[in-house]
Amino acid sequence: MKPESLQVTGSFKIRGAYNMMSQLSPAQRRKGVVAYSSGNHAQGVAAAGTMLGIATKIVMPQDAPAAKIENTRRLGGEPVLYDRYTGNREEIARKIALEQGSELVPSYDHAQIVAGQGTVGLELIDQCADQGVVPDQVLICCGGGGLSSGSAIAIKARSPGTAVHTVEPAAFDDTARSLLSGKRERNDPTARSICDALQTESPGELTFPYLQELAGAGLVVTDDEVRSAMRFAFRHLKLVVEPGGAVALAAVLSGKIQTRDKTTVVVLSGGNVDTDLFAAIQNEDAV
Amino acid sequence: MKPESLQVTGSFKIRGAYNMMSQLSPAQRRKGVVAYSSGNHAQGVAAAGTMLGIATKIVMPQDAPAAKIENTRRLGGEPVLYDRYTGNREEIARKIALEQGSELVPSYDHAQIVAGQGTVGLELIDQCADQGVVPDQVLICCGGGGLSSGSAIAIKARSPGTAVHTVEPAAFDDTARSLLSGKRERNDPTARSICDALQTESPGELTFPYLQELAGAGLVVTDDEVRSAMRFAFRHLKLVVEPGGAVALAAVLSGKIQTRDKTTVVVLSGGNVDTDLFAAIQNEDAV
């Protein structure tokens, strides 16, 4: 397990945001930055802004988990809320950026973001090596593909024999389908999933070619398998994992990939989940 | 934070159990061992038994958290249930031990148990040193005093200037009172607390003199402060911490000790909590 739920801001997203924002010029820093995010990227940008002294405005869906909106504010960011099903967050963010002359901090399709998120892959290979282990396979959740492509680049550079697999929720399996078809497939715009952190429209323009070159078959899990994995994490790992952060664990537990006699690393990418949802899932009977 | 909730079996108890049981003779090992425990020690003994090939019988209160009884069985132990308010677990365990010629694995009052639990203190000082930090104070939960006395011995040997404080639930503050009076005080036998792991009658005969020599004033927290600390751990640390494991964190959050400009280490001693109780606490409004 690589528990990025324990990372600063409760997810891996601080890695990419900090990497990009720390490379802005003093003039760019003074103008602040803008981002759009379903939540974890928002917190990463807000926290990186506070660390670097950069003002941050973050366009967030108004139905994002309350904890994520609240935490973005607490970390020093300014949330700008919009309606997920009528507004276009990208347009709203670009408009603010244009008005302010600010840089936009994208959530995945940017080389410095990909490189930052990729330190997850770099670290897990090094941490395995410290224990004398070379992983056979690494399972990484995939929304836009920043974490998975960046990690794949690092993992394959350090350990070419290690397989990398993306894992997605069933309704947002664009990357799995794209890896099969060879072109960037889109998700049904009416699709819904419990995994609020993984609801992207299609694989990234920058990230997808890396996954095509470096990743194996994409794995897909149902929301029920995700709920079950969250219960497992609570009961046996004593970790709070959010739905999107639990898909890779769900893939292992539901037998979507062969793990017998293999060393498998599972990235638990985040732990930002509302109390109500978490409690409801824990109280469900089935395991 | 020293999160022993992430330890094998979900608490620090495996440390002492393994240390003692690994030193049994082959003849003693063949006869199995017996223990009595409210739960975490039970799991530690069961897991150590499985690792070492020693059969384990564990006398447990029938109202212990279901997860603890279940896990003891899953880890290879055989639970022997009794009524906490009418039976005497010590007598029941001694009778089984006598009948079988088995060793009793005490939950705290034994040199090898104390030494094993003390590796928590040893590790945390070393882990702080790796980061160039010498802690000013370490807060450790206290039931019978195995963890706190063992850790105090290790901490004071490595870092004489570091203060060690025990933390107890308000209804089970025997150690705090004993440290004040200079003799082993007892708790009201009708006392109740949410902290099922810390419900001992009095400080240990072996452990208390070490605490008298090495520990500062004992800290005491209410059950409500513990509930609040469990919510904090969920929301901000993304860790599942059981009531007894959250008392040291509760002491910090409720201002029972001065932390400004100090480096404070908090031991989170375990994470074995029933789903129902955990969900109920998370859903409570106050933070």
Image: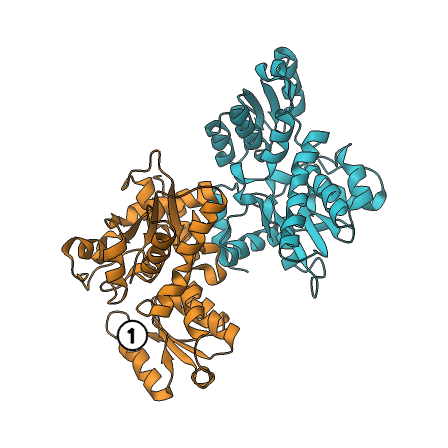
Chain colours: A orange, B cyan
Which residue is depicted at the point 41% across and 72% down? Answer: A20
Q: Position of residue A78 (x, y in %)?
A: 43, 77
Circle 1 marks a residue in which chain? A
Left or right: A43 as drawn, with respect to B82: left
* SS of the residue under disc 1: helix
Near-viewer residue (B179 or B1) = B1
Q: Position of residue B164 (x, y in %)?
A: 74, 49
Mark 1 is surrounded, within 10 Å at the Cα level, by few (under 14), some (14 to 19) or many (20 or more) other residues, namely many
Residue A240 visible within the image: no
Which residue is depicted at the point 23% across and 73% down? Answer: A86
Near-viewer residue (A79 or B125) = B125
Residue A39 against residue A224 in the figure, above or below: below
Q: What residue would you read off at disc 1?
A: A89
Left or right: B230 as drawn, with respect to B114: left
Near-viewer residue (A78 or A219) = A219
Residue B112 picture quarter: top right
Near-viewer residue (B203 or A2) = A2
The quarter of the image holding the C terminus of chain A is: top left
Which residue is depicted at the point 55% across and 24% down? Answer: B52
Which residue is depicted at the point 66% across and 37% down? Answer: B117
Tag 1: amino acid: Arg
Left or right: A20 as drawn, with respect to B263: left
Q: Position of residue B243 (x, y in %)?
A: 58, 46
